[in-house]
Image (cartoon, rainbow, N blue to C red):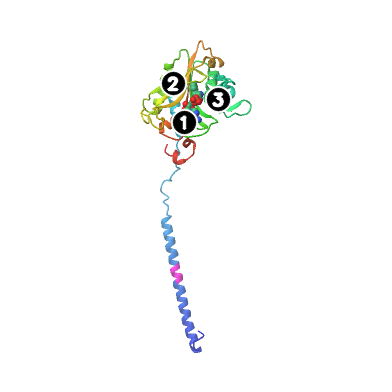
Amino acid sequence: MGQLAPQERAHVGKLLNAVKTELEAALHARKARFDEQALAARLDAEWVDLTLPAPGQPTGSLHPITQIQTEIEDLFISMGFAVLGGPEVETEYNNFDALNIPADHPARDMQDTFWLADHNLLRTHTSPVQVRGMQRFGPPLRMIAPGRVFRNEAVDASHEHTFYQVEGMIVDRVVSVAHLIYFMKTMLSHIMGRDVTVRLRPGFFPFVEPGFELDIQCFICGGAGCPVCKQSGWVEQLGCGLVHPNVLRMSGIDPEEWNGFAFGLGLTRLAMMRYSIDDIRLLQSGDLRFLNQF
Ligand code: FA5
């Protein structure tokens, strides 16, 4: 403008103003159109059909151990057993003494124990519920007791410090190892959904005599040997035996008149066998990618 002749300035100034106004108007108009288009696109994308049914909550499912526990409970109820519960904090007496494991007995070392104050402990097995069952109901008795147990041991692929067992017990007039085998085969075949082959090995538990470890033939390899059964063809499932007369006597039952069998099944290990889970730590990891599969 400075270089223009004074008489031209007014004219050019007016012209430039007109151009500026026109450009600004065009810019605003285009911006408004873009805004409109963006809004239309958003309304299109975020459109909600209020007539559709609501999507609903995603459903959870029962933990695999709970599923097997429920199946075992239903099976034993159908065979006339009561399902009993017991506290996870137990007395030393119920967990050990009443099961024929006195304070100085080396068998106490078989189960590394979380001790609490005043001769209490976190129960190391479900066997103290045998004691509670016998004392509460007396003979004849058919009971199972599923529950959580605790051991102060190093965790690895097949050992947890917190795991599940199912205890079982019959006290009646004439109970034999044949009865025991029948019930164990029935239970394990039911859970595995097929006939299982079992074998008994001598096993020491102070509360049974004779005592056994019961193995099932590995159904992952059919007995040929694989990593799950450590190439032996057999997998240990439970301890069992005929109830020791001292155990009956201590709970006020006359062993001359009554006898019985008892078993303690590792429920966590059974779940691993049924679902071919190769690491026990997965079960209590809380990992939804694992749990969603059940
Ligand atoms: C007992 O606990 C006995 N009370 C079982 C019993 C009951 C015997 C009645 C006779 C009569 P044991 O310590 O072997 O026995 O454990 C029983 C089962 O629990 C084992 O076979 C195994 O399947 C499981 N188990 C033991 N320790 C662990 C662990 N750290 N993690 C996972 N499962 C375990």
Q: Say which residue appears at 47% left-offset and 84% top-offset.
A: 12
Type of the residue with mark 3: Asp
Residue 266 in magenta? no
- Rounded to the nearest angstrom, the CA distance separating label 2 from label 3 is 21 Å
- For mark 2, does the 10 Å Cα neighbourhood hold few (<14), some (14 to 19), or many (20 or more) residues? few
The percent coordinates of residue 172 (x first, y second) are: 48, 14
Examine the image and state in which quarter residue 216 appears: top left
Give the numbered dot on residue 109. 3
Decide which of 266, 201 is in the foreground and name it: 201
Report the residue that reaches farthest toward the right.
118
Main secondary structure along the magenta-highlighted residues: helix
Confirm or reject: label 1 Cβ below 8 Å from ligand 1: yes
Quarter occupied by the C terminus: top left
Type of the residue with mark 2: Arg
* Residue that badge 1 annotates: 268
Decide which of 20, 153 is in the foreground and name it: 153
Which residues make up the magenta segment? 27-31
The answer to which of marks 2 and 3 sits earlier in the sequence is 3
The percent coordinates of residue 245 (x first, y second) are: 52, 14
The percent coordinates of residue 85 (x first, y second) are: 52, 26
Q: How many numbered circles does the render carry?
A: 3
- Rounded to the nearest angstrom, the CA distance separating label 1 from label 3 is 22 Å
Residue 2 in the image: above or below residue 282: below
The answer to which of marks 1 and 3 sits earlier in the sequence is 3
Residue 206 in the image: above or below residue 193: above
Decide which of 265, 111 is in the foreground and name it: 111
Give the numbered dot on residue 201. 2
Q: Say which residue appears at 43% left-offset and 16% top-offset.
A: 177
Q: Nearer the viewer, mark 2 or mark 1?
A: 2
